[in-house]
């Protein structure tokens, strides 16, 4: 474990690695049924955004990422992702309540789907990495107790 880093940040970092690989593999192996399921999930998420239903959006977000993991075809990585997502599940609504994160996530999800649909595995991995980095940065900025302590300590150091 990284000294001083909250577990949630470590889980998000692990997600970034696993899910980028999954997106890359899904772009190579996805079938029509899996593609349709992901498209349907995005449509449901759009409706959740319109209704302002963060909890439902979070559930569909969970399913979106797992569907990509299933389409990637690696059962071991899927199981690891399920475990990580289950550990984060209680925090997902909090994460999705952060400023602009749902808009950003919705945009990235569409970009990921587009890359997967066209079979562009490198782009799928890059966009997934970007997506999860944005989530990590939003978390650190708004929620991380370690970041909060650093800000407070810096203010104390500057005499504020």
Image (cartoon, rainbow, N blue to C red):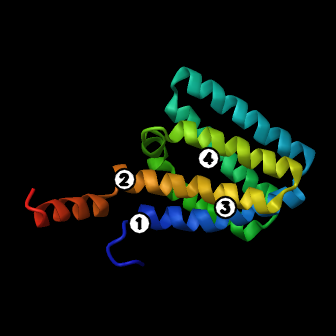
Spatial distance from mark 1 to mark 3, Cα to Cα?
18 Å
Q: Is the residue marked by circle 4 packed among few (<14), some (14-19), or many (20+) residues within 10 Å?
A: some
Measuring from the top left, give residue 70's x and y in whole percent. 77, 56
Position of the N terminus, as image quadrant, is bottom left
Residue 62 disc label? 4
Viewed as shown, does residue 62 lie left or right of 25? left
The answer for how far apart the CA atoms under marks 3 and 2 are is 22 Å
The residue located at (62%, 68%) in the rendering is 17
Judge left or right: residue 147 versus residue 138: left
Q: Nearer the viewer, mark 3 or mark 2?
A: 2
- Pointer 2 with pointer 4, Cβ within 8 A: no
Q: For mark 1, what is the residue?
A: 7
Sequence-wise, the earlier of marks 1 and 3 is 1
Residue located beneath label 3 in the image: 19
Q: Which tag is nearer the camera, tag 1 or tag 3? A: 3
Q: Secondary structure at mark 2?
A: helix
The residue that appears at 10% across and 56% down in the rendered structure is 160
Q: For mark 1, give the secondary structure.
A: helix
Badge 3 element = helix
The residue pinned by badge 2 equals: 141
The picture quadrant where one finds residue 145 is bottom left
> Badge 1 local density, few (<14 within 10 Å), some, or many (20+)?
few
Give the answer, above or below, for where 95 lies relative to 40: below
Residue 35 showing in the rendered view: yes
Q: Nearer the viewer, residue 63 or 15?
A: 15
Question: Counting residues from the N terminus, which is met first, the one under dot 3 or under dot 4?
Answer: 3
- Which residue is at a point 35% across and 49% down the rendered structure image? 142
Q: Position of residue 143 (x, y in %)?
A: 34, 51
Residue 24 screen position, x and y as percent = 78, 62
């Amino acid at each position: 474990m990284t000294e001083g880093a909250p577990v949630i940040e470590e889980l998000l970092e692990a997600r970034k690695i696993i899910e980028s690989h999954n997106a890359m593999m899904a772009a190579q192996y996805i079938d029509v049924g899996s593609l349709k399921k992901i498209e349907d999930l995005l449509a449901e998420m759009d409706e959740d955004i319109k209704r302002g239903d963060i909890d439902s959006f979070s559930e569909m977000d969970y399913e979106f990422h797992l569907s990509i993991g299933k389409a990637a075809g690696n059962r071991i990585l899927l199981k690891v992702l399920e475990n990580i997502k289950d550990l984060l599940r209680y925090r997902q609504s909090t994460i999705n309540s952060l400023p602009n994160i749902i808009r950003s996530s919705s945009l990235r999800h569409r970009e990921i789907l587009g890359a997967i649909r066209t079979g562009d595995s490198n782009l799928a991995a890059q966009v997934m990495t970007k997506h999860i980095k944005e989530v990590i940065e939003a978390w650190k900025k708004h929620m991380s107790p370690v970041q909060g302590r650093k800000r407070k300590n810096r203010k104390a150091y500057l005499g504020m």
